[in-house]
Amino acid sequence: MTTTQDIQSLMTDLGARARTAARALARSPGAAKDRALAEAARALRAAKGDILAANAKDMEAGGKKGLSKAMLDRLMLDDKRVEAMAKGLEDIAALPDPVGRILAEWTRPNGLVIQRVAVPLGVIGIIYESRPNVTADAAGLCLKSGNAAILRGGSESFHSSSAIMAALRRGIEAAGLPGDAVQMVPTIDRAAVGAMLGMTGVIDVIVPRGGKSLIQRVVAESKVPLFQHLEGICHTYVDGAADLEMARKVVMNAKMRRTGVCGATETLLVDRRVAASHLPVLVRDLLEAGCEVRGDAATREVDSRVVPATDEDWRTEYLDAVISVKVVDGVGEAIRHINAYGSSHTEAIVTDDAAAAEDFLQGCDSAICLWNASTQFADGGEFGMGAEIGISTGKLHARGPVGVEQLCTFKYVVRGDGQIRPG
């Protein structure tokens, strides 16, 4: 694709095929969708060699391009991750069918029976960057919820995502559903993103998953409604009533399990009441695990290896082995800091004080709030939702992990027996 006209023609064709597939999916019974997901999982396993070979090309190119260690980890596939994608599709198939659920029902005095019924959104566009497993997760969630999907992966994962998509389509077609239910934009030309953002009347909602620059562009340019989160500036607050060993375990996992995921803790807040006992241990644990620590004056006092933090650090999603640390005066200041600097994504408190925990859970204006658990649980799979298409930090329609139920809207079905509205 070399011209704007070529790109527009390509996207128009993808959109028309997606609309046709969406109409078929919307009427497909749950059993048919589940068979398609099971066949897609089998096809992924059968294509593992092709997928890993394609991923090797992406990894080699990413290394030459100078991608960070965290970005390469997001890009990398192995036997375990391919199996996780296949298992994820099977987990999605095991979920209840979200389509056709009666969300509410009532009868009017005139005898009209009114139902609010869950229905698919239609066509969902997903724009994402380096994580190729998103290809399988997003396609599976859209299929289960009766939606067609148009996926535009990043250039870094193009070969991997293409191989995954080919396997998914083979499985879906083997089960008798239209392969066009899931489509991938077959070009890395950025003009395709611009075309997607203008496809009103074709794409019903767009889900951007990626870095700050991608999200900002999508938010600024899209004429299509969005499920989006700008950043994952997640916090863990260690309260004055926190058990030290629990805090060590939770903080280490929240930051270092996988530093490149959006649920990784980026700022650690520690109550001044336990700064003398807890802070030196937590900082040492992080430093010895290979994490750079950027701290306020109180944090720098406990370890000379701590780098001074700037105001910008409190606003930064590192997606790497870097963390900012600040001492605060209790849960109230922790909440104020989070609401001022956070991105409404995920926050955690570690404490044995139930009242402090409730203050935190109620006071933080974020999509996900946890008590005595790692922020890395911010994931649809961990919530029992099978998988997620993303984490929404907005407040309209969907918030937090966006799973199959959130990929449905609703309509009203009204049944009568000849009622007319009086003049």
Image (cartoon, helix red, strand yellow):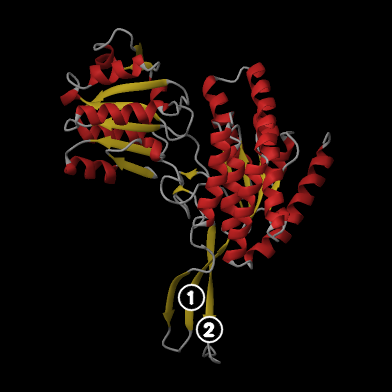
The residue most toward the bottom is: 418
Q: Alpha carbon of mark 2 to alpha carbon of mark 1: how far?
A: 9 Å
Disc 2 element? strand
Query: Quadrant where the N terminus lies?
Result: top right
**Please, is residue 202 above or below residue 32 in the view?**
above
Residue 415 shows up from this direction: yes
Residue 8, how many percent across, how many down?
79, 44
Identify which residue, 100 or 35, lies in the foreground: 35
Q: Which mark is residue 115?
A: 1
The answer to whether 280 appears left or right of 123 in the picture is left
| Above or below, 158 relative to 96 | above
Q: Residue at x 58, y 38 (%)?
A: 82
Ranked by sequence position, the earlier of labels 2 and 1 is 1
Q: Position of residue 161 (x, y in %)?
A: 66, 37
What residue sits 70% from the left and 35% below the top?
50
Frontmost residue, 368 versus 110: 368
Q: Which residue is situated farthest in the top direction here?
A: 304
Which label number is shown at residue 86?
none
Where is mark 2, residue-wise?
415
Q: How many marks?
A: 2
The vertical placement of 91 against 185, above or below, is below
Relative image position of residue 235 (x, y in whole percent) = 35, 32
Kind of residue at badge 2: Arg
The residue lying toward the viewer, choosing from 317 and 387, is 387
